[in-house]
Image (cartoon, grey):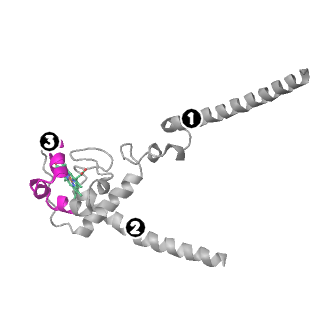
Amino acid sequence: MKTKIFSLIAAFSFTLSVTAAPPAEEGKSIFAARCAACHNVNKVLVGPALAGVDTRHSIEWIVNFVHSSQTVIKSGDTAAVALFNKFNHVQMPNHPDLSEGQIKNVVEYIKTEAKAGGEKAPFAKPYSARPNYAPLSSANYGFFLSYFALVGLLICVLLFAVQLKQYERRVAGEE
Ligand code: HEC
């Protein structure tokens, strides 16, 4: 039974890895050839760092922007106009020949690359959002400080209770 489950899991993860590898791979080569001159996943170059881009915009937005950024900007899209202003009106070249699937693969590549690290990735330090999930570090000392304060308080209360009991005994003994 155990071996059956094990081989099932093994087969499943194998299919996963086989089906999951190509998109990011294809995305990587597209990114290297057509985007890397201006973009890095984790660093601002000519264009913005693309880590987390899939959380800032919908995939349709990204596809439209990559096809023709000026069309999106001229349509008055507030996010696009703000970006264009922030990046000193540098026009991103159009890539109308990239299919929606190819652009999705680039986004997949960006996701894997962002996970791999880089100081500026917004999720490079996931524990800053959930400090109590992380080992002791400068990012969560507040949590540990309050934890130790609580333990300290508990010890004080216990010591006080013991003292009180002894005092009560002494008083009772004197009577
Ligand atoms: C010539 C430089 C250049 C190239 C090449 C380029 N970009 Fe850009 N990209 C920019 C600039 C500059 C911006 C900021 C918006 C603007 O100024 O239009 C931008 C913005 C973006 C945004 C919005 C980012 C955000 O943080 O919201 C996405 C997504 C994007 N680019 C994807 C791509 C992809 C995918 C490619 C390759 C197929 C690519 N870019 C190629 C310069 C470039």
Residue 102 location in percent, x, y?
Answer: 26, 67
- On whether ligand 1 comes within 8 Å of the CB at mark 3, the answer is yes
User: Mark 2 sits on what residue?
Assistant: 21
Q: Find the distance from the CA under tag 2 to the CA under tag 3.
A: 36 Å
Q: Is residue 75 magenta?
A: yes
| Amino acid type assigned to the residue bearing label 2 in the image | Ala
Q: Which residues are magenta?
A: 63-88
Whether tag 2 and tag 1 are in contact, CB under 8 A, the answer is no
Whether 112 is among the magenta residues is no
**Which amino acid type is shown beneath numbered disc 1?**
Ser
Residue at numbered disc 1: 146
Residue 73 higher or lower than 23, as above or below? above
Is 64 situated left or right of 117 in this image?
left
Which amino acid is tagged 3?
A: Asn
**Rendered image quadrant of residue 33:** bottom left
Q: CA distance from mark 2 to mark 1?
A: 44 Å
> Given the current orientation, which residue lies at the most extreme left position?
74
Residue at the limit of the structure toward the top, as seen here: 174
- Precedes in sequence: disc 3 or disc 1: 3
Task: Answer whether labels 3 and 1 touch (C-beta < 8 Å).
Answer: no
Which label's residue is closer to the chain start, 2 or 3? 2
